[in-house]
Image (cartoon, helix red, strand yellow):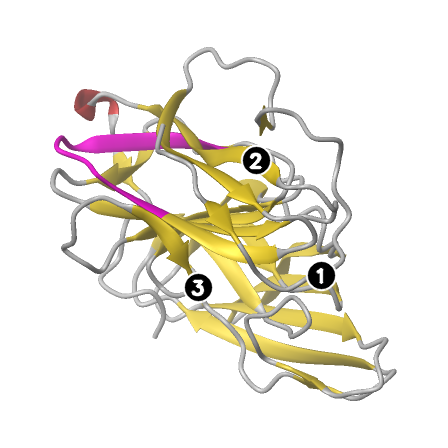
Amino acid sequence: MLACAALIGCGSEVVEQPHPQATTSGTSTEGWTTLIDTSWEIGGGSESYWCATKTFHEDLYINAFRPLGSTGTHHTLLLWSKGNQPDSETVCGPTLDESLLFASGVGTDDLVFPEGVALKIPAGTQLLLNLHLFNTTTAPLPGISGTLVKTLAPSEVKQEAEMIMPGANGISVPPNSPGSVQGDCTFPGDATLMSVWPHMHKYGTHMRVTHQMNTGEVPLHDASFSFTEQKNYPITPVPVLAGERIHFECSYMNTTSKTIGFGISSDDEMCFLGLYRYPKLASACQ
């Protein structure tokens, strides 16, 4: 576990549960190990970001992810680090890009891959844990957040998985009105899709995801979105051929008197779709 530090930021309103020391999405920890975690403390009525990095010295094959988070952890992003700096912990800013390999929010449950499928962390890799923290109380709030995993032995791995994160551009939701935006990811090679993770902010209301083929479309996910319960949605594995598309549409309800556009704040909006697939391909989308 890494050391703690105080964070200071701007206030925001988020619904949270009573404070535990640290919580996971399941009741049993059998078979789960800590991949990365960090201790933090955030001032009363504040919002901020906290980052920790960790370097792995042996190949690691991950078959399942589980979020670890105390109250005050709004969301957790686990990314491939782009730097070569020593492992550290520090106040930071938000990070969300194509280097993402696991994400969790309030209410995210376990993500378990099919038998023999694993995401590889090569020896020498440094991972970045990016935390978005909220404290809706008036007192300082300490916590522990991170990611737990289950792993496979190299001999048990039959397919190497990856996470990709296509997004949609052009978000502009008029004041006191609904709105939507659409995006696509055309697969550059044959792969099997096994999970979707919708990501919007607090004005997001619905996401619809379909598999687009020459013969028509097949719905993969069509459900309401809740900013306070951001889940991964495992699906029955779906073969997607090279040139076929995953199409997604994000819907919003703007309850403010200003136009809502793209941005990193919870008061702005996003439309991203986390997809887990195997095997690992040369590029995310065409």
Q: Residue at x 49, y 56 (%)?
A: 49
Amino acid, disc 1:
Ser
Quarter of the rendering containing residue 24: top right
Q: Which residues are magenta?
A: 52-67
Q: Whole-percent x and y of residue 205? A: 77, 64
Residue 142 tag number: 2
Of callouts 2 and 3, the N-terminal one: 3
Q: Are the residues tagged 2 and 3 within 8 Å (C-beta)? A: no
Would you say 27 lies left or right of 119 here? right
Quarter of the rendering containing residue 92: bottom left
Query: How far, Cα to Cα, is label 2 from label 3?
Result: 19 Å
Read off the residue under disc 1: 12
Q: Residue at x 75, y 68 (%)?
A: 203
Q: Residue at x 57, y 35 (%)?
A: 142
Query: How far, Cα to Cα, is label 3 from label 1?
Result: 16 Å
Query: How far, Cα to Cα, is label 2 from label 1?
Result: 18 Å
Image height check: is 138 above or below 248? Answer: above
